[in-house]
Image: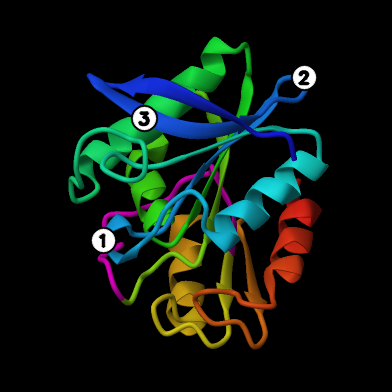
Amino acid sequence: MKEERVFFKSQDLNIEGLINESQGQNAVVVTHPHPLYGGDMNNNVVESVVRAYVENGYTTLRFNFRGVGGSEGGYDNGTGEQEDVTAAVAYLCGLGKTSIDLAGYSFGAWVNAQCIESLTDVKRMIMVSPPVNFIDFSFLEYSEKIRLVIAGSEDDIAPPAMIKEMVPRWNPEAEFRMIKGADHFYWGKTGELERMIGDLI
């Protein structure tokens, strides 16, 4: 992967990202886990999601939420972070990308879910380990954009049984996939994760 460091504006803040540009219209924004628990764009799962998309010819943009790494500002309980996602999507639109996916892991999936309906340029969304046992997801109603939800069988932050019950409300057409033996961090299981995402793409 030949990622380049970029900065884009979210409101008046400079947000740090890594972009891997490919030809064509397809692109994805990938969001990272909880900033207050050490989450950033260099996370192993975030890198796996990026790799799956790069291998399928997509332009990828991962970034650090406000207050993380080289991004200005501070943690904003998911509110300002939605602005960061919106700004990342706008940045890709500015590069002429017209078919954009949104993929989030853990906290990133929660932030994405809150702003997905307002993001008219986003065609579909992938959620990896949405932390339903840790943050309230009751706000999330039907969205045709939700296409794939992945969880690990040993994940107590994103328990597969809880998620499986919620997916039909989010989108009855969405695919729910479970990775056996994986916990919230997917150590040793990221190859399987990449294959599942590759299957969808």
Where the C terminus falls, by quadrant?
A: top right
- Circle 1: element type: helix
Of the image marks 3 and 1, the number of the one nearer the N terminus: 3
Along the horizontal axis of the image, is 91 left or right of 24? left
- Circle 2: element type: loop
Along the horizontal axis of the image, is 12 left or right of 151? left
Q: Are marks 3 and 1 in contact (CB under 8 Å)?
A: no
Residue at image point 33% right, 77% down: 133
Of the image marks 2 and 1, the number of the one nearer the N terminus: 2
- Pointer 1: what residue? 36
Which numbered tag is attached to residue 94?
none
Q: Amino acid at mark 2?
A: Gly
- The residue mark sitting in front, 2 or 3, is 3
Q: Magenta region: which residues?
A: 134-149
The CA distance from mark 3 to mark 1 is 17 Å
| Residue 142 versus residue 96 in the image, above or below | below
Q: Amino acid at mark 1?
A: Leu
Residue at image point 36% right, 71% down: 132
Q: Is residue 119 visible?
A: no
Along the horizontal axis of the image, is 136 left or right of 23? left
Q: What x and y, as percent, mark residue 32?
A: 45, 52
Q: Amino acid at mark 3?
A: Ile
- Pointer 3: what residue? 15
- Pointer 2: what residue? 24
Residue 11, picture quadrant: top left
User: Does the magenta portion include 117?
Assistant: no
110 and 33: which is toward the camera: 33
Q: What x and y, as percent, mark residue 59?
A: 68, 30
Residue 128, picture quadrant: bottom right
The CA distance from mark 2 to mark 3 is 25 Å
